[in-house]
Image (cartoon, rainbow, N blue to C red):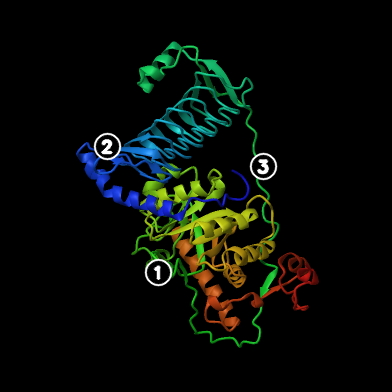
Amino acid sequence: MEGQPNNMAEPREVVERSFKINNKLGPRLIEAAKQDAILRIGWTSAGDPVPKDGELGLCPNLPRGSKMRALGVLGSWTAAFGSGGNFTIQGDAGAFLGAGNRGNTIVCEKMAGNFPGFAMRSGKISVMDGVGDDAGALMEGGLLMIRGPAGARIGGGMKDGLIVIHGDVGSDPGAGMTGGKIVINGRYPSRLPSGVTQRLLTAAEVKHINAELDNAGMEIPKDAACLVPAERLHVETQDRPVSTSDLSSIGLVAGDLHHTAAYQTCDTVVLIADGVEGKSPLALPLPLLPVVSSGTYLEMPDDNDPMASSILSKQPFITRDQPRPIDFVLIDSTNLADAPELLEHSGGMVVDLDELPAMNSEEIDGFIVATRTMLGTDKAVSFLNSISRVESLHVRSSHHNIDLAISRIEDGSGMAEAATLPMIGRSTKSHLSDTSIQTGMLLGLSASGQDLAILCASGINVVCCEVPMQDPRDLAHWLQSISSELSSILKRLGLDSIEQLQRQHLRALDYETAAISGLRLVGYDRPLPHWFAR
């Protein structure tokens, strides 16, 4: 769903109950797989039925050979990221059933919600009584079999794989698909989305698909429709608008404090999730989380350059691949299926809400239960969302007990960086003031020590940014130069810690910046009058 999040969330007891089930099942799954035994959820030890009612995020990353059977109504993100287990639901399932599947065989004996099989790569998912919207969206492989009606956009954006529907489908089937097949034994819209075409199956295809289905009652007839991608004219997309200005029009002034000695040390360390019960705080040497595409760019032999190696070993980064134990891994739709390995070896998680389907509160809870079961509940979790949705980001972060809320500046709006400061400040005061949640900002370019000082003074706890280079030695020198610049600024201002930076240290250097930021205009030394108007 678009727009503001659904605040009618499942009770926190459901989330805690779901975590407890996952924690209890974890060690038993591997042992049961060795014994070829079936584990059951929804029955007492004596075999009496006690159906589940809304538990979510259950059984992520089922290991190969494991067998699970559940009874009742399960919530979202059930049996996601599976690696070869078997999961049968005697009842209904919520959204994102089997998302990121890499080999599970999943059977839902009744209905499933939206996005079943989302971004799956392999395995087989069968739903026996219909599904919601976006079934099989972004599939890269595997088989999704549906009996009963399917909602809108089935197979949307799929790249490969096979979807078979014995029933009617809603609007826009296959929208944006670039590969794979959607086989429909039922009614479908006569007007197909652009880039999708319908054809008949060959006799060989019918035989092959029925062999894959391996179910005499679910075989497709030879006259079933087959939707596949059509040839389309390639048109280069235009780049998004970028921020109309940087922070160079904001200055830092000392006030009445004397400068400190040049040899004095300055505290630039920031702790994420510090003082949060059950969490292990993560130390940042600088209020900075740089972004690299892969943790392999941070590997450097100690004997090559011991100083550079030491700097990199202490600085956490955000990376989409090969994270180190101190790094945050960025999770989005493209690497979702790799989540088990990525989360296991990382120090925290950044969830890119802009690059995942829009989720309501229950679905976010399910995602968090599933991923934190693999990540560990003691590690920090962050949400990343566009600056245009900063209030929604902060509301969601507060509701779901997230540790760090990061606003993406380059969201296509072209908004000036200075204009985002009061937006984040107002939202933080309204939604995060009574929480331990920290705020972050993701810049479109690499940051300087001046940028860090300005943003910390404006109330931003952590600055995320692209790196100017990918070579590990150059990265270490870049970090060292930022540290030196930030320390010099603090000494000039008469401060010995970044925690002492405040908004009163900031000045807008021109009228336009003062007008959009609410900062005191240099010389005038007050905010412009319209900032006091109601």
Distance CA(mark 1)–CA(mark 2)? 47 Å
Q: Where is residue 167 drawn, in percent x and y?
A: 50, 22
Q: Is residue 190 shown left or right of residue 166?
A: right
For this rendering, which residue is in front, 398 or 164? Answer: 398
> Which of the 4 image quarters holds residue 92?
top left
Q: Where is residue 344 drawn, in percent x and y?
A: 36, 52
**Element class at badge 3:** loop
Distance CA(mark 2)–CA(mark 3)? 47 Å
**Location of mark 3 (residue):** 238
Q: Where is residue 105 drawn, in percent x and y?
A: 35, 32
**Location of mark 1 (residue):** 307
Say if 4 sits above or below 427 in the image: above
Residue 490 got which mark?
A: none
Say if 73 sits above or below 429 in the image: above
Name the amino acid, label 1: Met
For this rendering, which residue is in front, 257 or 407? Answer: 407
Name the amino acid, label 3: Gln
Disc with the residue nearer the chain's start (1 vs 2)? 2
Label 2 crowding class (10 Å Cα cut-off): few <14, some 14-19, many 20+?
some
**Location of mark 2 (residue):** 65
